[in-house]
Each structure stands twice: as C-alpha cells, then as structure tokens.
Image (cartoon, rainbow, N blue to C red):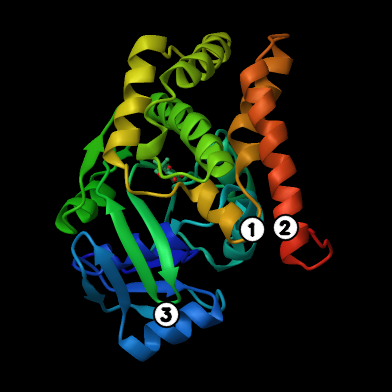
Amino acid sequence: MSRPVYVFGAGALGSLLGALLSRAAPVELLARPDHAAAIRRQGGVRVSMTRPGIYPVQVRESVGTLPEAALVLMTVKAFDLESALQALAPRLDASHLVVVLQNGLGIRSLAERVLGRSVVRAVTFMAASQEAPGRVAFNAAGKTYLPANGEVLELWRRSDMPAVQVDDIETYVWRKLAINAVINPLSALLHVTNGELAPLQRVAERLVQELAEVARREGQSLEARETVAKVLSSMQQTSLNCSSMLQDVRAGRRTEIDWINGAIVRLAQKHALAVPAHTQLLDLVRFVERNVRSHARGSRVLS
Ligand code: PAF
C-alpha cells in the first residue's frame, strides 16, 4: 500500500502531478479557495489534452495536519519555498518523506536547512498549464529524474509517469537550469509557446555558452553543444506549452527569474565572469514583471 500523497502548492504542475498520482495513492492538494471549490464541485482535478479526465483528489485550503506517513510533494514556486517549508516544519514527523521539485539552484540545501532533515531532490520535465480553477492542461509527459529512492520512483511509475533513477541529481538540476534559463525568459518576453522559440538557436547557444562557463567554475560539467541540443529538444517536446514564466507574466504574478537567470548572474559575479546575455534577460524580465504587476494592481494607467 502506498503512502498518502500531500501536494503542497496546487498550481499547474502540483495539480497535474496530484491528479496523475491519484491513480496509485490517495492524494490531497493544498489549494487556493477558488481552485479548491472547483475541485470539490466537479469531484476532482479536470485534466485536458494528454490523458484527459477527472481525477479524484481530496483538497484543503490551509496546511492543517499532515496524513500519517505522507509523501509531501513541494510544488510551490521557488520564491515561496522557504515560507512554505516554515509552515510545514512543525507538522512533520519521522514518518514523512519530503520531495522538492522547484526550478533553480540551491533548492535542496534551502529545504534541508529550513527543515533540519534530508529531503529528496527531484527534477521534472512534466509540462502543464492552469486553464481555470479546477482545470489543468497536461502539455507534455516529460521525464522526472530522481535520486536513489525506490519508493518515489515506484510511485511515479505506478502512476504511469516517466521516471528515471540517477546517481547524480545535481547534473540534472543544472541541465534543467539551462533549459529554464533559455526557454522561460525568452517565451515570457516574446509571448510565444516553447515550440515557437525554435528559430532562436543562436540566442540559445550564447546563453548556454555563458552558463557552461559558470557551471565549470562551480565544478559541474555542462558540455555546451550537447546542452544546446537538449534545450532545442525540450522546446520541441514541450512545443505547445506556455512556459511557467510566461504563465506568470500573463497572470501578473511574480516570476522565478531571480532563481533562474538571476542565480546564474550571481554565481558569475562570484567568479568574476561576465554573462551579458543572462544579465540582459534578467533586467528585461524584471522590467516586464514590475510593469505587468503594477498594471495588474491598477496603479499605472497605460495610454
Ligand atoms: O518552467 C517550465 O515551464 C518548464 O520547466 C519547461 C520544461 C520549460 C516547460 O515549459
């Protein structure tokens, strides 16, 4: 019998993972009130595109008490992770297992520092977008990379989601960083789907070259040509997806730019390296983010 799954953060990705995992384990989602109400009304999360249907899950609107021995899947945005973990910490006991899935660097060390215990760092290429409260589009069945933890791997596989066990999860953290550092800011600035970025190969090459040098200084090997090929193939595999950053910009929400290109710029500074392409994307996305967010709050009138 599987552990119950508790999904902390029912945005697009959290809702999709919760829905799919409900085939193998009882699932509870922590969701915003409008999302929670829609899920209750329709009897589960409604998934469209790939594997459409209504997936029965329990839902709650505040953290509350965790189910005994739950697998806690942290799917909040990187910038909300620390406060989410602080809310979680007093509710955890030795029976719980915490899995962190955020985009960006330093996620596992942040989680382990706040919780004072080890967590499972996973990297996922599942792609989803939220269509409305209670509804998510399943845009691409990407692989999830997991360190040696048979239990989580087994759960993923029983839910029919592609999962790969890897020895060095950090390599996949850096690979995903490369993909996010190209696709997310470009799609958010240009308002295009991931697939529509394919002609921008030269821009991708420049960004990856800068990142590969930062990675090398951090003791990670990220072969530039191979990484560019992975970025281009990710654009193709998630071609219909609007990246999470584009979804955030469109919804007037904060983006993960500081955890992606911002993290690269900070590391470059530490090593006295210039990363002009990442710096420009960071400045541009911050600009858009500020303008869109202040516009959404009605504090700015555009003529
Ligand atoms: O953040 C995202 O949107 C996703 O990580 C990815 C893989 C770029 C797909 O859209």
Q: Residue at x 30, y 74 (%)?
A: 46
Pointer 3 local density, CA inside 10 Å: few below 14, some 14–19, many at least 20: many
SS for callout 2: helix
SS for callout 1: loop
Point out which mark residue 293 bears.
2
Pointer 2 local density, CA inside 10 Å: few below 14, some 14–19, many at least 20: many
Q: Residue at x 32, y 48 (%)?
A: 240
In the rendered image, the vertical position of residue 78 relative to residue 86, given as above or below: above
Which quadrant of the picture is home to ligand 1?
top left
Question: Seen from this angle, which residue lies furthest front?
Answer: 303
Observer-side mark, 2 or 3, equals 2
| Number of numbered discs overlaid on the protein picture | 3
Q: Is mark 3 within 8 Å of ligand 1?
A: no
Residue bearing mark 1 = 253
- Depth check: give the residue in front, 23 or 211: 211
Q: Dots 2 and 1: beta carbons under 8 Å? A: yes
SS for callout 3: strand
In the rendered image, the vertical position of residue 55 relative to residue 101, given as above or below: below
Residue bearing mark 3 = 59
The kind of residue tagged 1 is Arg
Which callout, 3 or 1, points at the residue further toward the start of the chain?
3
